[in-house]
Amino acid sequence: MDKVIYLDNNATTMVAPEVVEVMLPYFAELYGNPSSMHSFGGQGGKGVAAAREQVASLLGAEPDEIVFTSCGTESDSTAILSALYSFPEKHHIVTTRVEHPAVKNLCANIVSMTGHFHRITKLPVRPDGTIDLSLYKESLTDDTAIVSVIWANNETGVIFPVVEMAEIARSRGILFHTDGVQAVGKIPIDLSRTPVDFLSLSGHKLHASKGVGVLYVRRGTPFVPFMVGGHQEKGRRGGTENVASIVGLGKACEVAAQNLDAENSRVKELRDKLEKGILKIVPKSILNGHETERLPNTSNISFEYVEGEAILLHLNQYGICASSGSACSSGSLEPSHVLRAMGIPFTAAHGSIRFSLSVFNTEDEIDFVLEKVPPIIENLRAMSPFWKSGG
Amino acid sequence: MWNYTETVKDHFLNPRNVGEVDNPDGVGEVGSLACGDALKLTFKLNEAGRIVDARFKTFGCASAIASSSALTEMIKGISLDEAENISNEDIAEFLGGLPKEKMHCSVMGREALEAAIANYRGVPLPTAEGELVCECFGVTDVEIVRAVKESNLTTVEDVTNFTKAGGGCEKCHDRIQELILSARAVTGTEIKLERGAKRLTNIKKIKLIEEVLNREIRPALKKDGGDIELIDVDGDYVYVSLRGACVSCSASQVTLKDYVEKKLREQVLETLIVEEE
């Protein structure tokens, strides 16, 4: 495959060249252990410390509020389990029906492993994927140990009013965690003015490498570690630091801060061009998710009466990378739980395609995709027993 | 990404025989939008009763489209009796194999073919009857038992891969497990008791015991005017109460140990001990 048009940036991103550059010395040259007493190892420690400041700066946090982990999933597990350990007398978690599997399946596991000792409230969403704050307020009880909601949805890009939701939880004395994996770097975040207690982020979603993540833990928040071992991360996460990836993540956060405007202008314009173009040219195509309360890079479009995996594999023939919420593409038999929570009809849920852009995409690429998508859909519809020609 | 064979990719990207036959002799429609795949198969026969044209319309993933395309190629030029013998395994084999999670695509092809032949002959579909086991995907016990026997399936996961049954809310998993056990017992296939024994929950054990009682033991006892009732299950101990003619029968203890216990040990758990309450 010679040409790749990568529109799957919510799945993972290209490691930015400047990130690769700062990582490389930490493999073969500066390979010391940050915990060592010698100055050779200390160089790794300095790299990690600098990265901690870079991450903190992007989030509006203090460096000592940054805990490096291995991925977003580890951060989510750490935050939620920490809250349950810290408040053993509380047995209720408030979350939503549109969470990433890292939170969704963790909550399901907590319930089954504790023999239904814990109770989970999964808040519904509106057809456009947004949340009803009055239902949220009603769901909070004195028994609630933690709220965990996704800041920006990975499938639809829909943004939840996390600032307001965190303030409500704070006023009730309830811990608040947000999965910020998709939000960080794409929308402005200032944790000095947002009372979240925990925030998860993942390196590879913002042009750093896979295998590194962060859990932001607000100063003063009760904390029980998930990975227990050495004194790394001030005892909050045992295990030798993934130095190269951490240094890379620091750089990626610095670059993300610089690119935030571009994400919300140039990337958004490209996304809008792609989205409006498809919705205009392809009949019976529907945008999934709120039009404006949404990440600037994400577009989730349903093509009625065709199946997502078939669309993806045709796109793949042209080197176009996207993803689908259809059942077949996930290996399960049911379409995306996010789209089902939004009440997207089955005629559309199986034919959903997510395009997610990055600053590395160009207008030429978008034009190419706009040229290729309509005939693919037409071709598959001609084959579909449900499609009546002429719509 | 799925690991599809070159043949699957070819039939997906260049599907053969797309469309509908004019004035078809047989029409078979299976699947639904809700299930994520559906296939409409139409065919035309010549005077000699051979399929001269077959076309398909499919909503579904790459392997569903490829399976449909393969099916139409396989049935062209053959008689209905020959077509009837095509199994889902044959379709998968024609394509050089399918990922196991995608075997249900080949089953859909086989089902559409059966439906089209039944439509031509004006007879009802056998699989449409029977007890609805999986409500999410509308799969009956007849379809599940058939898949278990034909493709030698041993686990609920296998059944889901082949028929989709159990792939949704998972409520029917216990029932599918029972169907696997009874289908394999009937075909005389060895049931891996030791593996099953460790995995049986109390509920499953009780359900299985009840099923064997109802299916085999009670009908046999009733022939002699007797009956049996399950009172309790405690670990390996199965407490029953004999009724009717059994109560006064001098051979009832022999029946209990040599027949009831033997049957339950064969079909549920080999460590079971049957006691009269």
Image (spheres, rainbow, N blue to C red):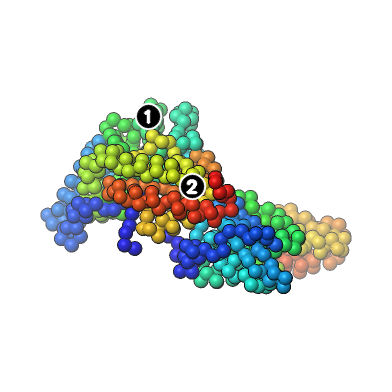
Specify the label residue A164 is tagged with: 1
Q: Secondary structure at mark 2?
A: strand
- In the rendered structure, which amino acid carries the disc numbered 2? Phe
| B157 shown above or below A54 | below
| A203 shown above or below B218 | above
Q: Is residue B6 visible?
A: yes
Q: Residues within 10 Å of mark 1 (few under 14, many from 20)?
A: few
* Quarter holding residue A76: top left
Who is closer to the viewer here, A298 or A68? Answer: A298
- In the rendered structure, which amino acid carries the disc numbered 1? Glu
Specify the label residue B215 is tagged with: none
Who is closer to the viewer here, A375 or A39? Answer: A375
> In percent of the image, x 69 and y 69: which residue is there?
B46
* Quarter holding residue B53: bottom right
Host chain of mark 2 = A
> In percent of the image, x 76 and y 69: which residue is there?
B258
Q: Is residue A117 visible?
A: no
Q: Which residue is mark 2?
A: A303
Residue A61 lies left or right of residue B33; in this view the side is: left
Host chain of mark 1 = A
